[in-house]
Image: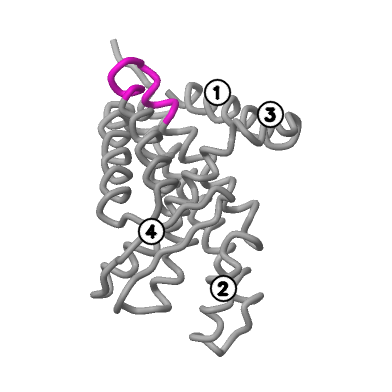
Amino acid sequence: MKNGIIYRIFIFLAIYFGLRFFCGEIGYKILFPINLFVTFLHELGHAMGAILTGGSVLEINISKTGAGFTRSAGGSLPIILMGGYLGSALFGNILFLIGARSPSLAKPILGLVGASMIFTSFYWYNSLFTTGFLIVFALSLFLIIWKTSWGREVLMFLGLASILYIIQDFNIGPSSDLARYAKEMIILPATAWMYIWLVVVLILFYFNIKLIFKNLDSEEITYS
């Protein structure tokens, strides 16, 4: 099992970095839906921050540029703002972990992700593009669930690609969130919070990797 996970991780890393850095415009277009998926996780993190702190979500937007926003009412603004960057990193790590360690749960989790996208597209409706993307992506996940045996691979790739994208764009993606967060938490400037958030994400990824490979060697021992 350990060798299988390592093999998959290296393949996914090669695919992701190959497309992002060596395939130019074609690689960008192939990864574009993944970038929008990461935006969805980011905005879902804001939404969860609002709901968990007693607020409500009014709408979620995902734009053609890859940016997005969540409009909410009430709740704790610092937690809502943190929820975007840190929440999306948490979601990505969970997807990666489940895909790596619990293959039997891969398809149900993909179904849950697809259902959450369908729910968001209508209940927190903002635009035709947002709804259209979420529905098409969700239907693609459902097709993978019903017609292929790639559930584990897709879940792992989505999780890993999300984590890598979040880490690489730490100084771009959450810039507006950081500016507002610094106004709320005036003890440190936005740049300091940017690196604090990045360190939290890196630590989260480190412990996730440790958890993925924990006890795998002992699990592979067979007895006669």
Q: Quadrant of the C terminus?
A: top left
- Foreground disc of the pair 1, 4: 4
Q: Main secondary structure of the magenta part?
A: helix
- Foreground disc of the pair 1, 2: 2
Mark 2 residue element: helix
User: Residue 69, image x and y in percent?
Assistant: 46, 62
Chain-order first, disc 4 or disc 3: 3
Circles 3 and 1, Cβ within 8 Å, touching? The answer is: no
Q: Is residue 140 above or below residue 118?
A: above
Chain-order first, disc 3 or disc 2: 3
Chain-order first, disc 3 or disc 1: 1
Q: Which residue is mark 3?
A: 26
Q: Which residue is mark 1?
A: 7
Q: Which residue is mark 4?
A: 60
Q: Which contiguous range is marked in magenta?
A: 143-154
Q: What's the distance in space between the residues labelled 3 and 1, CA to CA?
A: 25 Å
Circles 4 and 3, Cβ within 8 Å, touching? The answer is: no
Which of the two residues, 224 or 72, is positioned nearer the viewer here? 72
Circles 3 and 2, Cβ within 8 Å, touching? The answer is: no
Crowd band around label 4 with a 10 angstrom C-alpha radius: few (<14), some (14–19), many (20+): many
Q: What's the distance in space between the residues labelled 1 and 2, CA to CA?
A: 37 Å
Chain-order first, disc 1 or disc 4: 1
Q: What's the distance in space between the residues labelled 4 and 3, CA to CA?
A: 28 Å
Identify the residue at image location x=56%, y=50%.
Answer: 66
Q: Disc 4 residue type?
A: Ile
Q: Is residue 164 above or below residue 90?
A: above
Q: Is residue 146 magenta?
A: yes
Identify the residue at image location x=63%, y=55%.
Answer: 169
- Foreground disc of the pair 2, 4: 4
Q: Disc 1 residue type?
A: Tyr
Q: Disc 3 residue type?
A: Ile
Q: Which residue is mark 2?
A: 178
